[in-house]
Amino acid sequence: MRAVITVVGKDMVGILAKVSGICAENNVNILEVTQSILQDMFCMIMLADTSDSSVPFTELSEKLEKFGESNNLVIHAMHEDLFNSMHRI
């Protein structure tokens, strides 16, 4: 299964490394990443393969959200199917 992970917040050193580190710790493979800096705002979207994850998807999502909260970032992880359904016309 694949997931879409979004990260938004004030730019600082190491955001990509820390988020990808959480993925690696939980055996989640990052397939694609796009990121940009809009003035001083960091924006990133990741497509990740969670099929071999060592934790349930809800736990991974909670870990990412907690990291975000403690670093003044907004991080969301959602199933690719849900993401596609939300953006289908």
Image (cartoon, helix red, strand yellow):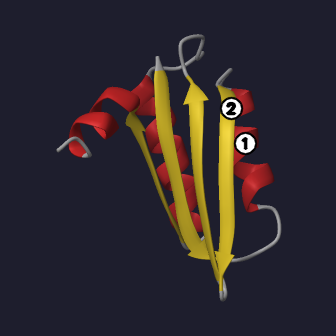
Going 76% across and 40% down the picture, which residue do you hit?
21
Determine the residue positioned at 67% across, 60% down: 35
Q: Secondary structure at mark 2?
A: strand
Given the current orientation, which residue lies at the most extreme top position? 52
The answer to whether residue 21 is above or below residue 75 is above
Q: Residues within 10 Å of mark 1 (few under 14, many from 20)?
A: some
Q: Which residue is mark 1?
A: 20
Circle 1: element type:
helix
Does 65 sit above or below residue 14?
Answer: above
Q: From the top left corner, tell me how far across and down residue 31 is, in percent.
A: 67, 30
Residue extending furthest front? Answer: 89
Q: Is residue 86 left or right of residue 1?
A: left
Q: Which mark is residue 30?
A: 2
Q: Are marks 2 and 1 in contact (CB under 8 Å)?
A: yes
**Relative to 75, is 84 above or below?**
above
Q: Residues within 10 Å of mark 2 (few under 14, many from 20)?
A: some
What label sits on residue 72 in the rendered view? none
The disc labelled 2 sits on which kind of residue? Ile
Please report the residue visible at 60 percent of the width from the left and 11 percent of the height from the top: 52
Q: Label 1 sits on what residue type?
A: Ser
Which percent across, then down, holds residue 32?
67, 37
Relative to 67, is 4 on the left or the right? left
Residue placed most toward the observer, 85 or 62: 85
Sequence-earlier tag: 2 or 1: 1
Q: Position of residue 27 (x, y in %)?
A: 68, 20
